[in-house]
Every structure is written in C-alpha cells, then in structure tokens.
Image (tube, rainbow, N blue to C red):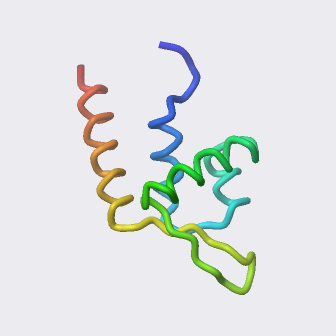
Amino acid sequence: MNNRRSNVHVIADILRLGEAGKTEIMYSANMSYRQLQKYLDFLVRGEFLERKVVPNPGIKYCVTEKGTRLLQSIENVLGLLELE
C-alpha cells in the first residue's frame, strides 16, 4: 500500500476531533486549506458536521449524531482490514 491517506482516513481524522475551528482541523488532519474546504463542504452537506457560531474563532464545526455513526462505521471497517 502507499503512504497516502484515503478520503475515508481523512474524514475519520476530521470527525475524531468532535468540535473544532478550521485552523485546528487543518493542522490536526494535516491538510491544505483547499483540501479542508472540500472536506468541510462535503461533511456539512451530508449532515455529518454542523457549523456553530461562537465568539472566537467565529465558526466551529461540530460532529452530528450522523457523523458519530459514520465514524464508528469507518473505525469498524478499518479495524477489520487491519486484522487480515
């Protein structure tokens, strides 16, 4: 396998944060701002994340119940793949 992370791994990294601003997500998930925008748009549209207005940094992204279920499913699948 190659060293690049799949989209599924990146999504799991974002969802694991629970609640975070863009900068924290970008650095924690190790991605560029352009990549971040792509993933955030996808996750918000799919209702896996929701935008929450806060005083500072202004917007935080919070994992929804649907996002939590997705993360659990991803971790189950990744766990099964590592066993083989």
The residue lying toward the viewer, choosing from 33 and 18, is: 33
As displayed, is residue 67 above or below residue 51?
above
Q: Is residue 45 left or right of residue 57?
A: left
- Residue situated furthest bottom in the rendering: 55
* Residue ID at (53%, 52%): 14
Task: Estimate the x, y position of residue 54 in percent, counting from the top left.
Answer: 66, 83
Residue 49, percent from left and from top: 48, 62
Q: How many marks?
A: 0
Q: Judge left or right: residue 16 versus residue 60.
A: left
Residue 79 or residue 37, whichever sits in front: 37
Q: Pinpoint residue 79: horizontal percent, then vertical percent.
A: 28, 35
Q: Residue furthest top?
A: 1
Is 48 left or right of 79, judged from the image as shown? right
Q: Residue at image x 27%, y 35%?
A: 77
Q: Is residue 54 left or right of residue 66?
A: right
Which quadrant of the structure image shows residue 64?
Answer: bottom left
Q: Residue at x 49, y 45 (%)?
A: 11
Q: Quadrant of residue 53?
A: bottom right
Relative to 34, say whether 15 is above or below. below
Q: Position of residue 69 (x, y in %)?
A: 29, 56
What residue sits 54% from the left and 29% below the top? 5
> From the image, which quarter does the C terminus lie in?
top left
